[in-house]
């Protein structure tokens, strides 16, 4: 698959095994920036022990507002072998985390499917969370069936204009919604243990952007119309200007409290039942991990 890369919707066709780089810039080796017990995910994911989160470097989107741009765009991280990644998973499990949380994994899907199989053979038993931007191909996600327990995708945009302008992906909504429906087919509605920790299921994240509350409402409308009420939605208000937002004055400002609350109100108006919202102050740099190769 890496010889003629068609892993994501961009289908660049480069030979990653021979050092050719497509849109995302990834080669054959997986690059990891940090692996630790993350305390700042949704409550059902972080719980009281933390989520065993592995941050991968590189991304197949170019979001101008990416809070993790140091790893997604600037490629900070360390290349690891498959056996090393298996050990990273097992070491996190040994620390008592609730799950293994793979952040921005899409561009490494074939390698991760192999690594997860080997890790499970070696005793990995906690749920695996696929924490992605949803810009994925359903046929690639099918490789993960039985290996991933929880899908935690973004659904960033509905309209083509902001998807093109801010993430260089005009077909984002079409591709992401197909991917999310495949994710739901695999894992269904969320299932929780007696302490409220998710064991299986789909949670859709949506980051509300300044000036785009109407697009956010369209995203919620899709979820209401195409998925059952048991699916959870995580409405995120943590947007903060960073990275390249200075080039885009209309989003080079914090999200207002009024914008965020209007989207939350629309969630209830639609009759959506399950979800998470963030408290005021979530838009703080203190919640951006310090990418320092911890655990790698």
Image (tube, rainbow, N blue to C red):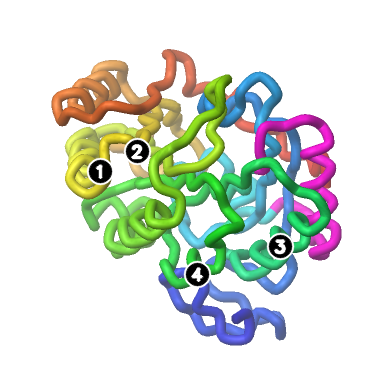
Label 1, label 4: how many angstroms apart (C-alpha)?
Answer: 22 Å
Q: Quadrant of residue 218?
A: top left
Name the residue carrying label 2.
231
Mark closer to the chain start, 1 or 2 = 1
| Labels 4 and 2 touching (C-beta < 8 A) | no
Task: Indicate whether residue 93 is drawn in magenta.
Answer: yes
Distance from Cα at disc 2 to Cα at disc 3 = 27 Å
- Segment tinted magenta in the rendering: 76-100
Give the number of the mark in front: 3 or 1: 3
Determine whether label 1 and label 4 are within 8 Å by CB.
no
SS under mark 1: helix
Residue pushed farthest left?
269
Q: Secondary structure beneath disc 2?
A: loop
Structural distance between the alpha carbons of marks 4 and 2? 22 Å
Q: Residue at the spot x=59%, y=25% of the render?
A: 40
Q: Which residue is mark 3?
A: 117
Q: Please give left or right for residue 36 compared with residue 202 in the image.
A: right
Residue 36 painted magenta = no
Identify residue for label 4.
Answer: 140
Counting residues from the start of the chain, the first of labels 1 and 4 encountered is: 4
Decide which of 142, 6 is in the foreground and name it.
142
- In this rendered view, identify the residue nearer to me: 216 or 129: 129
**Mark 1 touches mark 2? (CB < 8 Å):** yes
Q: How far apart are labels 3 and 1 at the CA level? A: 31 Å
**Image point (44%, 56%), residue name:** 186
Q: Position of residue 220 (x, y in %)?
A: 23, 38
Whether residue 181 sits left or right of residue 289 in the image: it is left
């Amino acid at each position: 698959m890496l010889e003629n890369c068609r892993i994501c919707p961009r289908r660049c066709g480069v030979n990653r095994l021979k050092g050719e780089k497509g849109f995302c810039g990834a080669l054959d080796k997986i690059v990891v920036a940090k692996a630790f017990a993350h305390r700042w995910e949704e409550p059902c994911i972080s719980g009281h022990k933390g989520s065993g989160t592995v941050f991968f470097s590189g991304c197949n989107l170019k979001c101008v507002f990416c809070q993790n741009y140091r790893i997604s765009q600037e490629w900070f991280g360390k290349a690891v072998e498959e056996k090393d990644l298996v050990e990273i998973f097992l070491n996190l499990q040994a620390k008592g985390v609730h799950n293994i949380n793979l952040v921005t994994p899409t561009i490494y899907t074939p390698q991760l499917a192999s690594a997860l199989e080997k890790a499970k053979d070696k005793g990995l038993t906690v749920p695996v969370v696929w924490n992605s931007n949803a810009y994925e191909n359903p046929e690639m996600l099918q490789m993960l069936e039985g290996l991933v327990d929880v899908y935690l995708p973004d659904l960033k945009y509905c309209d083509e204009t902001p998807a093109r302008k801010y993430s260089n992906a005009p077909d984002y909504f079409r591709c992401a919604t197909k991917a999310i429906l495949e994710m739901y087919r695999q894992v269904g509605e969320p299932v929780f243990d007696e302490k409220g920790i998710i064991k299986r299921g789909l949670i859709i994240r949506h980051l509300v952007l300044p000036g785009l509350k109407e697009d956010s409402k369209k995203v919620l409308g899709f979820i209401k119309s195409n998925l059952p009420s048991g699916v959870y939605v995580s409405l995120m208000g943590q947007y903060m200007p960073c990275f390249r937002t200075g080039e885009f004055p209309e989003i080079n400002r914090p999200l207002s409290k009024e914008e965020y609350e209007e989207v939350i109100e629309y969630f209830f108006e639609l009759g959506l039942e399950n979800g998470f919202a963030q408290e005021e102050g979530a838009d703080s740099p203190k919640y951006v991990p310090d990418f320092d190769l911890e655990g790698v």
